[in-house]
Structures are given as structure tokens and as C-alpha cells.
Amino acid sequence: MNAPEFLNSPRSKAMGLLTSCSEIFGHAAFTSAKPMQLFFMAVGCDDEAVVVQALFEWLKTGRRFPAPADIRELIAELAQPSTSTKEVE
């Protein structure tokens, strides 16, 4: 399993958001790149924009530091078409 390509960017939004999540939720700081690489490998999504969207959603709704499975589930939920039948007037 390879690490997502966005991890090679020194200014990766996903990496920055995950670092912010660790600070916000009181999780231990990432002291090396390897744990962060493993986190994103476990998430299993190479599309940085999708991962960033899921991390932002977690920041709005989460109450603890996310596990990779939490982000995977959010990605799956966000990919589902909206079931809203609300009509625009």
C-alpha cells in the first residue's frame, strides 16, 4: 500500500488539518511523518480535496481525534447523493 501523493507536498492541506485536529482534540502531536503517512494510508483515499472535506466535516461534528475509519466513513457519506427533496421556491 502506497502513501497518497499529497503527502509529498510540504504544504499539504490534509496534513495541516490533521495537525490542527491533533491540537484541537488534545491528541499527541505528530513527531515524525511516518504516523501521519500511516493515518492517510489507512484512510485509503488519494484525493486530497475529498480528504480535506471529510476532515473539515469532522472538525464541525467530531468530539475526539478521528481514527482513519472515521474519516473513511465520512468520505463514504459525503459521496452519497443528497436525499433531500426540499424544493427551491
Image (spheres, helix red, strand yellow):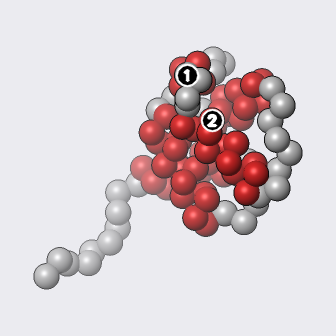
Pointer 1 residue: 9
Q: Quadrant of the C terminus?
A: bottom left
Q: Quadrant of residue 17?
A: top right
Pointer 2 residue: 15
Residue 5 location in percent, x, y?
54, 20
| Dot 2: element | helix
Q: Quadrant of residue 45?
A: top right
Image point (35%, 63%), residue name: 82
Image point (54%, 54%), residue name: 56
**Residue 22 in view, yes or no:** yes
User: What distance separates the C-alpha of mark 2 from that of mark 1?
Assistant: 9 Å
| Mark 2 and mark 1 residues within 8 Å of each other at the beta carbon | yes
Which numbered dot is residue 25? Answer: none
- Outermost residue on the front side: it is 11
Residue 28 location in percent, x, y?
86, 45
Q: Tell which of 42 and 55 is nearer to you.
A: 55
24 left or right of 84 in image? right
Q: Quadrant of residue 18?
A: top right
Q: What count of labels does the image hold?
A: 2
| Dot 1: element | loop
